[in-house]
Amino acid sequence: MSQKFEKLKTLLKELFQLDQPDLDFGLYRIMHAKSAEVTQFLDKDLLPQVQQAFGLYKTADKAELEKELAKAIEQAQSLGADPETLPKVKELRAKLANDAVDIGGLENEVYDHLFSFFRRYYSEGDFLAKRVYRPGVYAIPYEGEEVKLHWANRDQYYIKTSEYLRDYAFRLKPDDAAKPMRVHFRLVDAAEGEHGNVKAAEGKDRSFILAGEDFIAEEGGELVLRFAYSPATLTDWPVSEREGKKKPPAQKDLTTSAVGRILAVTDAAFTPWIAELAKPHVNLNGEAPGHSRLEGHLKRYTARNTFDYFIHKDLGGFLRRELDFYVKNEVMHLDDIESDTAPRVEQYLSKIKVIRRIAGKVIAFLAQLEEFQKKLWLKKKFVVETQYCITLDRIPEKFYPEIAANDAQREEWVRLFAIDEIKGDLSTPAYSAPLSCEFIKAFPTLMVDTRHFGEDFQQRLLSDVDGLDAHVDGVLIEGENSQALALMQAKYAGRIDCVYIDPPFNTDASAIDYKNGYKSSSWMSLINDRLRLSRPIMTETGVLIAAIDDEQQRELNFLIGDNFDGRILGTVVVRANPSGRPTQTGYSVSHEYLIFAGETPKSKIGRMPPTQEQAARFSQKDEDGVFEWRNLRREGAGANRADRRTMFYPIYLGEGTIRIPDMEWDDASESWIVKEEPKKSEQVVWPINEDGVEKRWRWEHSSVTRRASDLCIRKDRTGKDYVYAKRRPHEDGVVSVSSWFDAKYSATEHGTAVLKSLFGSSPFSYPKSLFAVQDAIYISGGGAPKALILDYFGGSGTTGHELSPKVGDGLICQAAAVAV
């Protein structure tokens, strides 16, 4: 068996992840189940298939022909004849010159090409497109688009893995079915820190630290090693190394310390385990990296919670397309076909067939594994828990005794609202423990959280709340945001008015991780799939807002344009940091960007919130909020009939009734043909002013028909009955400019300072100004009554803080939330 074949087989084992046979969690369990099938393919089926493919040319094998020629020459010489005169020798020499095939050389060529192909597209567990056109030049898939947006990981799902902490296990003797000696790294304590898309605060990065006491135990026939996941401190240095240290140990130091402590265990009960863990770690290729098996697994354990990963969206199709490209570009040379004899051309084509056939089998194996991971990723996740927060005024009084007796709920109210400081007076009951029903009745806006109660209480409560969905003014989904968006597709299809996202800026302070170092490319895959999931749930007038800084502004602008058919409505520069952030290039960065995009051509950017003077006019209120009445007839610029002929039509007014007659638009006359005469009790009103000038209505005919409940009959300034419409605050205000430099947009004063006032310190880094978020959502449609607003990079919760009552209603969460 040739060295080149062994080299190829080693690579394929790495691709099939058979280099980690001792791991015993997640996908590796599936790999164990398939390992026999994969091993059979690599060890027993692959080589014979290559040799069988060349079997047709065995009679023309150069080595065999040379042996046969030597034998014929020897026989001729033994008979005293001239070998070159014999027909047999002449025939063999002709075959060697014209037909001979170096079978061994061809086989090695096939192995070389297969190795080069798979190594080119495979790197540390992921497949990346590197279409080599010629040395140093790559080609990208292109179909004649005007502009092509491409990046290295475009065809892959970005998988965030920083929180997959729970389960890591491996077997010291994976081939021993009776006693595999399973070792389990168990997390016994995890401090709050980086999670999802929230980066840890400076100096608070968490590390894996071997538990202080009882870190080793044997449970159920497996060895358990316990770890904490929390910020390291100076005391985590070994006592012998602690002196003079000014910084806590890094993960590398903690791993070294853990290995030393574990291997130093002298308890006889653990002797067999320690002996196996202390053996040298050996890589698949036989190399020994110079550390123990224990250290190898600890390094792998800590690394898998640092890196982010990819799953290919169509690995089979991708590799088959790339194989075609590789064969045509790297294997097939037309000059060889033109200059060679027919037998050699046939052999040459056979080599190509063998490469395609063998590579196709390998691709089928790889695609099957990747497709399984893809299905797991795309599978809708189970909702493991649902809780409700309900104000007391919406809860029937029969539940009050249970609520008053619940200490957990009372303690939460004390912590959040300081109700224990209420002393009481003649009209207000005093705080007590337990609470009294009278106290609860006196504060109907207190929020009951059902997580403090049993499932029976929750079910009884929800069944007693009529029209539950109508009462819900905020939905919070905690989970990975792309999974949350997938979960929302059916219920919220076409319903979201405004999407606001503040994704990771991918700067040095908050860069997403990826093991291959594709920083921007990884970030683009992360954002791209989430943008794609946003559109189906947006209304036809929906607007998406994305906050970003200079680091990825260009890429994000491309991504949004690519996903929203080029409908970038505008970009606003926000002075978020008036004092500036120094940079290495010498200037101070004080700005960020807000990029606005529309779901359809009907999406528009609205006006800024009304001033205090404007807002004062909205003195009336209904179930949809405050409003004022204004004349339905338009005045000012663009108000004449000629400006919008379709908005010049009659309205019938009766005794307190408004009716829109049946009409049909006539293109020829550019006017409405009224098919219905007014009743005797009705008068006909047209948008004609006191001077007899034909104006137009503010609303289209279809809008008036649809929103008849927002119209009324009022006296105009001449004393005649006329049509008036409700005007909401979001319809007023001034046109936004593309630069927001007002002091209220400072993230320090109106973001960080707000958090400190709430919590005593700032638990989140880089919060946005409340006013920046408020105004962005407002002009994007979030200022309309009952607007649905979505944020799936919730971060510090700035969006939720500002949603009610100024824009929309509802709450926002870390992963994804809908404000109703």
Image: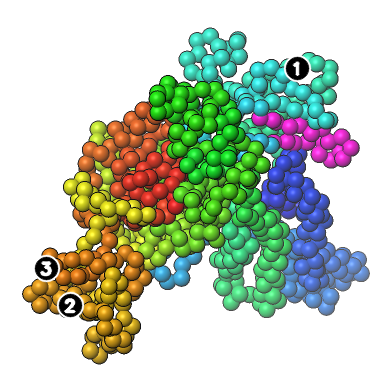
**Residue 788 as seen in the image, left or right of residue 594:** right
**Residue at position x 57%, y 43% in the image:** 387
Residue 193 against residue 730 in the figure, above or below: above
Indicate which label's residue lies in the foreground, 2 or 1. Answer: 2
The image position of residue 233, as x and y in percent, is: 53, 18
**Residue at position x 65%, y 38% in the image:** 454
| SS of the residue under disc 2 | helix
Judging depth in this view, the residue of 55 and 204 nearest the camera is 204
Indicate which label's residue lies in the foreground, 3 or 1. Answer: 3
- The amino acid type found where label 2 is placed reads Arg
The image position of residue 497, as x and y in percent, is: 40, 58
- The span shown in magenta is 168-187
Residues under numbered marks 2 and 1 in contact, where contact means CB atoms less than 8 Å apart: no
- The amino acid type found where label 3 is placed reads Thr
**Residue 189 as seen in the image, left or right of residue 723:** right
| SS of the residue under disc 1 | loop
Q: Which mark is residue 641?
A: 2
Mark 3, residues whose alpha carbon is within 10 Å: few (<14), some, or many (≥20)? few
